[in-house]
Amino acid sequence: MDREIRTIQTEFRFETKDGKNKISGYAAVFNSLSEDLGGFREKIRPGAFAEAIESDDVRALWNHDPNYVLGRNRAGTLKLEEDSNGLHYEIDVPDAQWAKDLAESIRRGDVSQSSFGFWVDTDEWKKEGGEVIRELVKVKLFDVSPVTFPAYPATSVSARSILDANKDRIPGDGAKPGPTTTARLSIQKMKLELFEKTIEGGN
């Protein structure tokens, strides 16, 4: 699966602490259903980011633009944590004019939404009240970003492609849930290894 992006309406805090300007807010909230993403809705299970917080190299970007890096967890300028509400972040704002301009826009309320870029490791699909629900169980985290416009339905691959790729995993009409994303990747890896061995054997 390709990288996906989700955006939420949130409240930022801009403050000066220990002589540093800081931006803090939530990049994601738990157990909250998204709008319709094109045939399904989505929610995030508590703990979905726990492993990513510990192991992934995550950046804070302005509008998901890698040219505007606000912070990085491995540099200590971005702090990430899960609490009962969701994925919380705190950024030490760099001493750059564009970052100061962003901080002012946040302070004024012109920018009020957060987004996160991720890759799905494990998800589950089910039907609730006639709706197809995708639950994110574990994700790999790329970035958290203050953003100008809401883009929750936007993904790097179309929502319809995501739905079509997981048709066999949606209960109903006698269908049984299929393997998780991780299992499907393992199967693909084994097929590739077998293919490579076949080629080597032929040589």
Image (cartoon, helix red, strand yellow):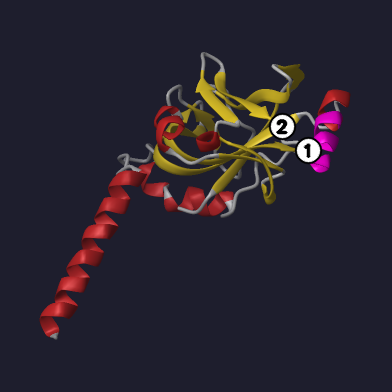
Quarter of the image containing the C terminus? bottom left
Q: Give the residue at x 15% y 78%.
A: 200
Left or right: 147 with respect to 72?
Answer: right
Residue holding disc 1: 99
Q: CA distance from mark 2 to mark 1?
A: 7 Å
Q: Give the residue at x 80% y 30%.
A: 103
Say if 87 sits above or below 153 in the image: above
- Dominant SS of magenta comes to helix
Q: Residues within 10 Å of mark 1 (few under 14, many from 20)?
A: some
Q: Residues within 10 Å of mark 2 (few under 14, many from 20)?
A: many
Say if 189 sits above or below 17 in the image: below
**Amino acid type, label 2:** Val
In the rendered structure, which segment of residues is drawn in magenta?
96-104
Q: Position of residue 77 (x, y in %)?
A: 60, 32
Residue lying at the far front of the rendered structure: 19
Marks 2,1: beta carbons within 8 A: yes
Is residue 80 a member of the stretch shown in magenta? Answer: no
Residue lying at the far left of the rendered structure: 201
Residue lying at the far top of the rendered structure: 84
Residue holding disc 2: 93
Q: Position of residue 158 (x, y in %)?
A: 58, 53
Q: Position of residue 75 (x, y in %)?
A: 54, 36
**Amino acid type, label 1:** Ala
Give the SS element for disc 2. loop
Residue 106 is at least partly visible in this image: yes
Q: Earlier in the sequence, mark 2 or mark 1?
A: 2
Left or right: 66 with respect to 148?
Answer: left
Left or right: 56 with respect to 78?
Answer: left
Q: Give the residue at x 54% y 26%.
A: 80
